[in-house]
Amino acid sequence: MLDAPLDPPQGMNTTQLRAGLWISGVALLILGLHVAMPGRVTLDQGTLVVLMIAVLPWLTLFFKRFTITGLVDAESRDRSQGVTSNPLPPAPRVMAQIPAPEPSPPAKKVLATLGRYQHQMFPNDPSRRWTFGVHPSSPEYADFLAGVAETVRAGWVAVSALTHHCMLTNEGLAYLENHGEIRDSGDFFAF
């Protein structure tokens, strides 16, 4: 018996994992009943569709895009976005010790993305923040991590422990106000 909690597979959060396990469990129960009592539980088209649905949550772990002709055409997302009314402050020790250098291209891309969508979503509401993250399977993930690490170190960006999305801090908003060329840059993560 395992005492440790079940970690969600890469690409699934805990809620998605629970839903996937529940759907798959119901489908396996139906299949088990058919094997145990083939006369009472038949495998008709409806049952087969339920079994196919049970497989779908797990397909997103292995395939970025999949198509079942006539039924489904799905694509998993490399990036996710959200909003928060509870922006995080930068770590106090970071702001006090490290002067803000010229950001690298990955850091500028993170700042440009946050600035662009923050301005589009909440142009006159600095109390709310637009957030985003890049999935580890994305080819842009390494640049995203490098940019986030640098901007967090500078105190311009904070990362939510709950969603793992990054967001501008008040200092980040002020920095972008003084550096509009970064926010208006054409190099950003598109959603």
Image (cartoon, rainbow, N blue to C red):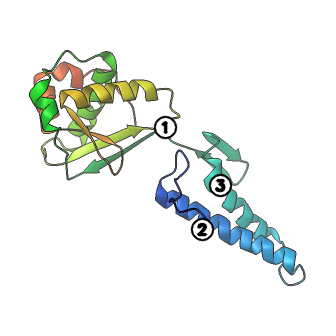
Q: Earlier in the sequence, mark 2 or mark 1?
A: 2
Q: Check disc 3: other Cα within 10 Å, few if <14, some if 14-19, many if 20+.
A: some
Front residue of this view, candidates 116 and 38: 38
Q: Secondary structure at mark 3?
A: helix
Q: Position of residue 167 (x, y in %)?
A: 26, 40
- 42 left or right of 184? right
Q: What residue sits right under mark 1 in the picture? A: 78
Image-quadrant location for residue 141: top left
Q: Secondary structure at mark 2?
A: helix
Q: Check disc 2: other Cα within 10 Å, few if <14, some if 14-19, many if 20+.
A: few
Q: Earlier in the sequence, mark 3 or mark 1?
A: 3
**Marks 2 & 3, CB-CB < 8 Å contact:** no
Q: What residue sits right under mark 2 in the picture? A: 22
The three-letter code of the residue at mark 2 reads Trp
Real-space Cα separation, disc 2 to disc 3, in angstroms? 13 Å
Question: Which of the two marks, 2 or 3, is nearer to us in this view?
Answer: 2
Image-quadrant location for residue 184: top left
- 4 left or right of 168? right
- 114 left or right of 5? left
Real-space Cα separation, disc 2 to disc 1, in angstroms? 25 Å
